[in-house]
Image (cartoon, rainbow, N blue to C red):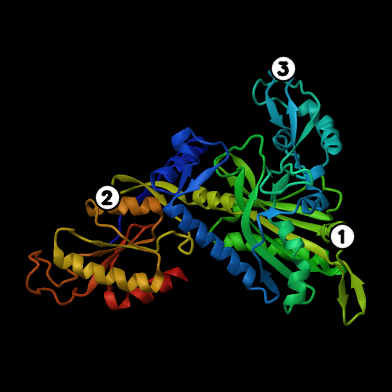
Amino acid sequence: MQTEKKENTINNDDRMEKIVSLCKRRGFVFAGSEIYGGFAGTYDYGHYGVMLKDNIERAWKKSMDMHRNMSFINSSIFTASRVWEASGHVSGFSDPLVLCDECNSKNRADHLLESIGIKADEKISEIEINKLFDLHRDKIVCPNCGKKNFGKVRAKNLLATSNMGVFDTEGSDQQSYLRGETAQGIFINYKNILETGSHSIPFGIAQIGKAFRNEISPRQFLFRKREFEQMEMQYFCYPSEAMNEYENWKEERMEYYLKLGIPESKLHFKDHDNLVFYAKAATDIEYEFPFGWGEIEGIHYRSDYDLSQHQKFSGVDMTYFDEDTKERFVPHVVEVSSGLDRTLMMFLCEAYREDDIGGSGRVVLKLNNVLSPIIACISPLLKNKPILVEYAEKVFSNLKKEFGRIAWDDNGNIGKRYRRQDEIGTPFCIVIDFDTLGDPSNTGGQEKNTELKDTVTVRDRDTATQERVNVSELVEYLKNKLK
């Protein structure tokens, strides 16, 4: 059955507010510590948010596991302080803070530079960010007062600290760090993976995990948080092949987002204008959010800096011996690093729609079927008809065993159930009605329509069209739709 549908336009400011509202209303994302007034830069994921995150993780892992020379790890969140000294995070990992001398507001200098199209590497030194800021100072306007009167850029370290059970010789607490990125956990395990695995250069190590940053100004919902999850892969390769590998990973990672339904017009590469000293090349894949273009993934050619630093600070040999060429060298590294929270936010922004169906307005999340928290929702037409409920429970049980991501909804009339599932992003609603029983007269008694018996109504989320599908063919029907 075809239903007339008309999509409505939404301005970007309203769009972001509506997405945040939907996330709370339907149990995707809640403000952190909300009953105590909230805690800036933190968010809690509800039921559907967890399921969406799991599906994004699964898709990312699958994209990495397609490579035969890939290993996965899960490194510790608490790490020896020397790790962060070696990586340069203790001395050079900071938010560049600048004060407006007109209104005394504090601003991130790199954010102000981004507002005029200048991209600075996150590990740029305080001296270099001051040079860059001074070079463009005449173009930068305070977002609070509109003036151009700024002081000197100061660095504030982003590493989150902890005193967890670490003492010095006098019994005082020693400062330790929660990891600022998942990459260092990969680098310090590089030798373990090399020695215990079956890989030779080139090979990759991937992981998904929490990272923590002492953000001065967390903002834009899930885009910039103090506690977040990263999906990172470090690809160890020959120095002579690293630049070619960098270009290959750029192409592959862009294709990944296109396959998951992000239109090409909403994605682009943004090369770094000012590279950190050890980087040979760096670019970001950016998505056009309602508030503007924002990074969702970084692709970096990091040279041999990280392994060389850990070799220097730990005394452990990080070189690789090539049996064919008899060469010994420190591998070069190409990194792909994306934020899980940002990626989830991107998919929500891209999926959010408002349209009119048959004269009735609705909100719908047109998520890629692979990512949708729920594949299908099972509903008996009437919850007070045991014969319908019993049949629906059998359908639910069979599909649940096959797919897992199956929901049950018998609350309210069928129209309200459809709207609720539309907002969750459920691709298919499956309704068990009296035709399913071969009894269109609604008596719940004798069979009167053998043609429709054992068929269900399957309603498509995106088009709102409905079709009858035989119960025995439901599993194959859904599998084909999920390909």
Spatial separation of the CA atoms under disc 3 and disc 2: 53 Å
Residue furthest out toward the front: 170
Q: Which residue is mark 3?
A: 102
Do tag 1 and tag 2 residues touch (Cβ < 8 Å)? no
Spatial separation of the CA atoms under disc 1 and disc 2: 60 Å
Residue 28 or 4: which is nearer the viewer? 28
Residue 61 or 190: which is nearer the viewer? 190
Whether residue 215 sits left or right of residue 93 in the image: it is: left
First along the sequence among labels 1 and 2: 1
Q: Residue 196: which quarter of the image?
A: bottom right
Whether residue 275 sits left or right of residue 64 in the image: it is: right
Q: Which residue is mark 2?
A: 416
Q: Which residue is mark 1?
A: 308
Q: Residue 301: which quarter of the image?
A: bottom right
Instruction: Establish if 448 lies above or below 121.
Output: below
Instruction: Give, as a three-letter code, the residue at label 2.
Output: Lys
Nearer mark to the viewer, of 3 and 2: 3
Looking at the image, which residue is at 73% across and 24% down? 99
Tell me if mark 2 has few (under 14), some (14-19) or many (20+) residues whose alpha carbon lies within 10 angstroms of its own: few
First along the sequence among labels 3 and 1: 3
Nearer mark to the viewer, of 3 and 1: 1
Visible in this render: residue 355? yes
Instruction: Give, as a three-letter code, the residue at label 3.
Output: Glu
State which quarter of the image contains the N terminus.
Answer: bottom left
Instruction: Point out residue 6 in the picture as x, y percentages from the top left corner.
Output: 37, 48
Residue 193 or 390: which is nearer the viewer? 193
Instruction: Point out residue 346 in the picture as x, y percentages from the top left corner.
Output: 55, 50
Visible in this render: residue 273? no
